[in-house]
Image: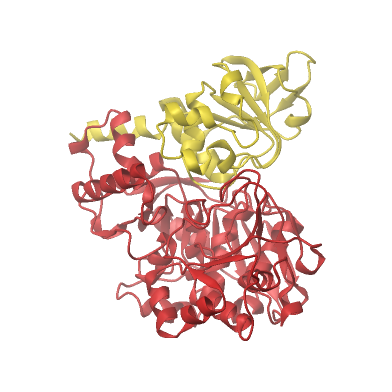
Amino acid sequence: MRKGNKMTMVEKILARASKRSKTSPGEYVTARIDVAMMPENFRLIRSVIAEAGIKEQAFHLWDPEKFVVVTDHRVPPTTLSTAENQKLIRESAKKLRVKYFYDIFPGICHQVMVEKGHVRPGELIVGADSHTTTYGALNAASTGIGASEMAYVIHTGELWFRVPETIKFEIHGRLQEWVHSKDVILLIAGKYSTEVAQYKAIEWTGSAIDEMSIDSRLTMGNMSVELGAKFGIFRADQKVIDYVKARTDKEFMSVESDANAIYAENYSLDGSAIEPQVALPHNVGNVIKAREVKEIKIDQAVIASCCHGRIEDMEIAVKMLKGKKVHPAVRFYVAPASWEVYKEALDRGILRDLIEAGGMIGNPTCGFCTGIQGVLAAGERCIASAPRNFKGRMGSPDAEIYLASPATVTASAIRGKIVDPREVM
Amino acid sequence: MEKIKGRVRKFGDNIDTDTIAPGPVLQLPIEEMKRHAFSPIHPEFHKTVQEGDIIVAGNNFGCGSSREQATAVIKGLGIRFIVCESMARIYLRNCIGLGLYPILSKGVSQIFDEGDEIEIDLGKGEVKNLRTGKTASFEPLSGTPLEIFEAGGILPVLKKRVEKES
């Protein structure tokens, strides 16, 4: 990019994708999409096209190198309608000649996308899933859209965007032991609201971010959407470059914000002062400190989903459970986010440790977060490492979902009630 | 520009997509799914809704999932306008994409009650409570979103493009 343009990372990506030298917040641009991803709602494409009166033979995939389909939400199917839908997905993938079709086995779409090298720094990526913001951890501008807009992208390879304002969150200092990136994002949701970034892009910066693993950053990219963000993007430091290069040979151009780029807001937080947080039902912004939660007994504890379920999350659980057991009144489900994570956890004995401590291992799927597996009965309470705690999301509308980091979830599983992990260790 | 009138259906803050289109019914056809719209908080909604009703809600309407069904069920129930303090980003895109008109207006949730009659002036960018006379302003759609809304949504736009190619 030319000097003196004063652009943020996201403005640069949108400028490149829309073939402009510069973009500014508020402008409408039509951008070429670098990668598009559809999870299990790919089943809708055929009916969307048919209802629009578009002839199936006239509808095609703009670039087979740039489109990915992952069957992940209801895996393996537990109902006949799901089985029929997944059969439809296979047929549609064949008809559209989808080259990168991951059927059932690899895992949750967002984890599959980063693991299989479909996400590269500096790219503009859309997915038919709200948590597509996850890839911001790898310096991509990535965001969620609906199925009809995805149909438009599949055929044309482009989409309109309103260039967002960028806000900067600087997390400086060093996170305390047993405090996770999840706690940072929950704290922000509670302190500044789940609309702090509505329609905006977040840049995550600061020494606490620099120190974070890719796994931890993926959690923050993932939950950027819970703050309303269109994008939640990180710098492409060496960790990012190494992670991506190990997974793809494709070339990429990472982006960096100009020193004089303009931010709509600047927030600065002392990472060392952040304590473990819990989001109470039924909203992600309903947050208090874990140590201030009063006697909330739990029936279920879950480490899974696109938000967690990575190797780091399971390492934390194993570390905490060493010499301890899951409380007898608690069902503790752990589901790795992908089969790559699953195999690594298997090879390293992590799954065995979890099972022996009283945990149950689930297969990679979105289902533990969305009420497909591990469904909650009326009156039950669950603490989960999931990104959302909406009423009824995991089963009965009369159940309660609490959100926390893997450490807080594990500590609570041990005690049978919600506790600060530092109390257990 | 036309004025639209309708009966107000009132909702609060943070009405999420799991509430509008609950996970367990997501695989049903829209015609069936719409009977479950808002069921976790308002199980009778589908029975009381009338064609042309207008939703008035608080902050962050439609937060959560990208599931387009959460917009499609509302369209299926005959609602074309959603007036709220603020709307979640993907939901807003899905409204435009399906040909619904999102109206964002600060203070709007305070001036309407359930059952009031609302008048929307798209030219002026104003909503009015016909019972109390109170008004609130909004920025009408413009640019690309307006073009897509006027075409009836993103799929009619795509259809035109596909037909042009062949």
B97 or A107: nearer the eye?
A107
Quadrant of the image containing the C terminus of chain A: bottom right
Q: Is residue B114 left or right of residue A250?
A: right
Above-or-below relation of A34 to B154: below
Q: Is residue A325 left or right of residue B114?
A: left
Residue A266 in sight: no
* Number of marks in picture: 0
| Picture coordinates of residue B13, whole percent (x, y) | 70, 39
Chain identifier, red in the render: A
Residue B112, picture quadrant = top right
A113 or B120: nearer the eye?
A113
| Picture coordinates of residue A13, whole percent (x, y) | 46, 60
- Residue at screen point 70% across, 51% down: A281
- Residue at screen point 61% across, 80% down: A321
Q: Is residue B41 left or right of residue A218?
A: right
- Residue at screen point 66% across, 44% down: A398
Q: Is residue A240 left or right of residue A154?
A: right
Residue B57, picture quadrant = top right
Above-or-below relation of A338 to A148: below
Quadrant of the image containing the N terminus of chain A: bottom left
- Residue at screen point 64% across, 74% down: A407
Residue A316 in sight: yes
| Picture coordinates of residue A25, whole percent (x, y) | 57, 50
Identify the image's colour scheme: rainbow, by chain, secondary structure or one colour: by chain
Instruction: Specify the colour of chain B.
Output: yellow
Above-or-below relation of B42 to A414: above
B94 or A74: nearer the eye?
A74
| Picture coordinates of residue B68, whole percent (x, y) | 46, 39
